[in-house]
Amino acid sequence: MASPVPDRELKKGSAELMILSLLENRPRHGYEIAQLIELRSRGAIRFNVASLYPLLYRLEKRNWIRGRWVEKAGQRRRRYYRLTASGKNVLSKQRAGWREFVEAINLITGIQRA
Amino acid sequence: MPDFKVEIRARLAEVGLSPVREAEIVEELSQHLEDEYERALSCGASEDEARQQVLEQLNTPDLLRRELKHVEPRGSEDPIALGTERKTNIFADLQQDLRYGLRTLAKNPAFTSIAIIALALAIGANSAIFSVVDAVLLRPLPFKNPNQLVMLWENAAHLGFPRDTPSPANFLDWQKQVTSFTGMAAMSERSFNLTGLGEPERLEGRRVSANLFELLGVTARLGRTFVPEDDKPGTHVVLLSHSLWQRRFGSDPGIIGRALTLNGESYTVIGVMPPFVQLPGFDNRNDQLWVPIAFPAEEAAEHGNHFLEVIARLKPGVTLKQARAEMDTIAARLEQEYPTYNTRRGAVVVPLHEQLVGEIRPALLILLGAVGFVLLIACANVANLLLARAAVRQKEIALRLALGASRSRLTRQFLTESVLLALFGAGLGLLLALAGIRVLRTFIPVTIAQVETITIDGTVLVFTLFVALVTGIAFGLVPAIQGSHFNLNNTLKGGGRDSGGGSKGNRIRSLLVIGEVAVSFVLLIGAGLLIKSFLHLRNLDPGFRSDHLLTMKVNLSEVKYPDRERRAAFFDEVMRHVHELPGVQSAAVAGNLPLTYNGDSMSISVEGVPDPPPGQQPDVIYRATGPGYFATMGIPIVRGRDFTDQDNGDSKDVVIISEKTARQFWPGQDPIGKRLKPGSSTSNSPWREVIGIVKDVRQNDFIASPKRQMYFTYRQLKNIAANALVVRTSIEPVSLAVPVRNAIWSVDKDQTVADIDTMDHIVAQAVARQRFSMLLLGLFAALALLLASIGIYGVMSYSVAQRTREIGIRIALGARRADVLQMTLKQALKLVGVGMILGLAAAFLLTRVLQTLLFGISATDPITFLGISLVLLAVAILASYIPALRATKVDPLVALRGQ
């Protein structure tokens, strides 16, 4: 069947997890994050500018990510976000939680099939 | 490249950001859009198409504005300060908080009404009780410098009267010798028959020293008060009370100088007192008039008759201790001078306020404490409600934080909401209190307070406001802090709905409920003890049968009936008429009915027994009765016989004694035929032969065990008057009230008949104070139980909702309905159990305070504790049952899907 469009609710709940994990390895700016999400989900998940940035600001206020204006030679300045220490902490907890949740779902749907 | 900044700025306009922050956001978002534009171009779109595509992102109706503005509720005009820490005007902030708080409360009518009602009940109860405390304990007495006023008593503890009414001789000696007081005045209760003005009326009043009103600092409204010249025997002047003047004389301004017939004699009215003048004394008598005490010579020399009430004012600079020391010295001196009368009689000085409220203070303070507990429980409930709500408002809180609101601002916001709730609750509570006071007034025992003075006055309003503020902060603080520091960990665990403040929030809620259970347990135990004690009291045998008994006071005027023969003739005639009335089983003449009067006593001597040393003569309470009294009252005659018509002035003097008296004076012997007489064996009174022994009767008050008693027949009494009638009826006693009164009036139309009452009612009144405490404490305990059950229900409901996913999984994994029920109930019982244990411990400590109000049971009565525990357990199980049932109905699929 065609790849299902994720439920809005699910997208909301997992948005933070996605962003945090994308920042795990290196700092990125907002457009980059949006592109990566669309790319890696093969177009299934797209973030609107109007939903993405308020989310980034929220994460920033919680001190899970930190944003900085960076001016690279020859480019206009852009705002880069990086993961903080507490952000890293949260990320691993979220990952575990998500894993459990998915397992639980699988268990149930698995039993029904059998 | 199109200018996207303009588009973005337009959509940010209504968010109300600060210029700096807005510029930042505009820059960042415009870069994103520009990148999108370039990409669209590189995918082959035309410039216009690319621009359209990009702007589509911003065109989702208001999305950007909404997401950024999500903090403010719909339709709000207030700008959100994004990322600023400006020190704005405190008042503007407060105004904003108030408006926002009101809006939030209005948007959740269910929550708001429950919270306000719970608070109204609790705060209202507090205000009502406080108004009583204010009127009785706190308000200063309506006299000049009331803290200088004291009452003086004789200490005759060895006779069972630690505060005995002084005798006139002692009073006059004290007055002559003392220096610690600016003045001393005496009062003596007196009733007057007012005749010559239509229906004869019996009025309560007092004989008072001429300097009394001056001593108290009270001046007359009309005319004047007494002067020293008035205080001589034969001066017949009278002061009227304000209510008497209004009621009987239509507030006639020309009343001064008018002559009134009191007790057959003419008195001149010299003044009218201001309203609500009430003199202190044994009970809260409502004096209608006052005459000078004017001791005649024999009375002034009276050492053995104790009946006065004495007030004095301390000289400025003299302490209570000094006054007491001086009185002790004077009493010792008098003991030497008059060994017959004053041996072991000391003097007691009691501050006036202490005298008036000392007895009722413990009960009132206990009630105030109880109602404070109820308030605590209500606070816990509302705090729980707020915590639950804070959980639901997570998103709002998160966004506000994200957009720059400081935690302290948020906390302040929530506190404002709480205080608003408390103020609304207090407002409604005051209305409830007004109604409650009206009800309270009707059954507050008269001995406690002048009921008219219990109102919601300025003091009560200030108290209520204070309680509201403190309450609002108390129950609001924890949810406010909790809410603004919401635990993100748990928010993330499940996303959205069931992250109710997380495990820390849960712990707080559980603690609150445990506290509620503990506190209501204490209140319930208190109420249970009082109820049991009251029932115990009511079941006491008064020694007589109080049913179907009609009573009334018939005070004969000394002028009209100066001697025994005329009094006897009057009563004989009245008895003849009364016995003829249909419905009358028996009737008798009586004196000082049980439970209506403290009881006069006299010392006696027993024939053949040498007089004990002075000061050790036994005191016996005496009563005048007539033939048939014991049968009418239902008092069993244990040995011998009752008085008959043949026991009169010409036959030998007789007396009937109570069992206790018999045991005391003739232990192991048969008293019948033995003799006793009033006073010492050498006194002039005649020896009286004991002709009968009757069962002890509870006379003075219900609680103390009966004292020694003896009875005379009115036909043989020269000086002691019978002053009442008792009638045993076969029908409803009240229905004979008018016929009996008419029977009396047919003999003497000017005779006053007062205090017509049934004995049942008198007995009920005797325990009015205990009933009052019991009813109120019971009411508060019930209220506490209700609030606590709501608390338990709330917490369990919430817990079930929270654990929906877990329950769903369990059921999916094979758990049965019964298992889920059990699991939920177990959780509830754990909370209740801990609460009960805490409550038990607290109850053990606190109920000692109740001991002064208890009768016949101990403050740690195990049966009561057990019974209440079972009741609480049952109610708790009931309260948790419905949520538990709901838990069993969880559909696993819905549970897991619908987060």
Image (cartoon, rainbow, N blue to C red):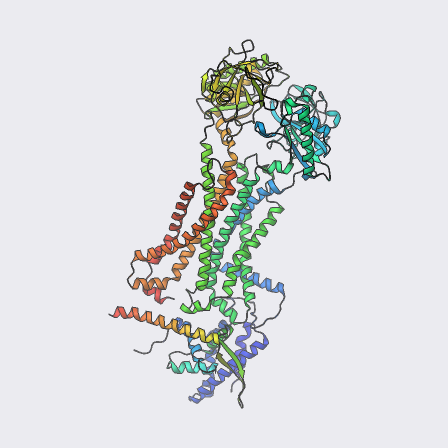
Q: Looking at the image, which residue sits at the far right?
A: B229
Relative to B94, does residue B674 appear above or below in the rendering?
Answer: above
Residue B446 in the image: x percent, y percent? 56, 34
Q: Looking at the image, which residue sits at the far bottom?
A: A74
User: Which image quarter: residue B270?
Assistant: top right
* Side (left or right) of B485 relative to A5: right
* Side (left or right) of B808 relative to B523: left
Q: Of A45 and B141, which appears nearest the observer?
A: B141
Counting labels gives 0
Give the residue displayed 58% in from the left and 16% down from the top. B748
Residue B477 in the image: x percent, y percent? 53, 59
Relative to B654, does residue B40 appear above or below in the rendering?
Answer: below
Residue B776 in the image: x percent, y percent? 50, 41
Residue B259 in the image: x percent, y percent? 70, 23
Q: Of B171 and B793, which appears nearest the observer?
A: B171
Q: Looking at the image, which residue sits at the far top?
A: B650
Q: Of B842 and B379, which appears nearest the observer?
A: B842
Give the residue displayed 64% in from the left and 17% down from the top. B559
Q: Quadrant of the C terminus of chain B?
A: bottom left
Answer whether residue B216 is visible to the viewer in this image: no
Answer whether residue B439 is visible to the viewer in this image: yes
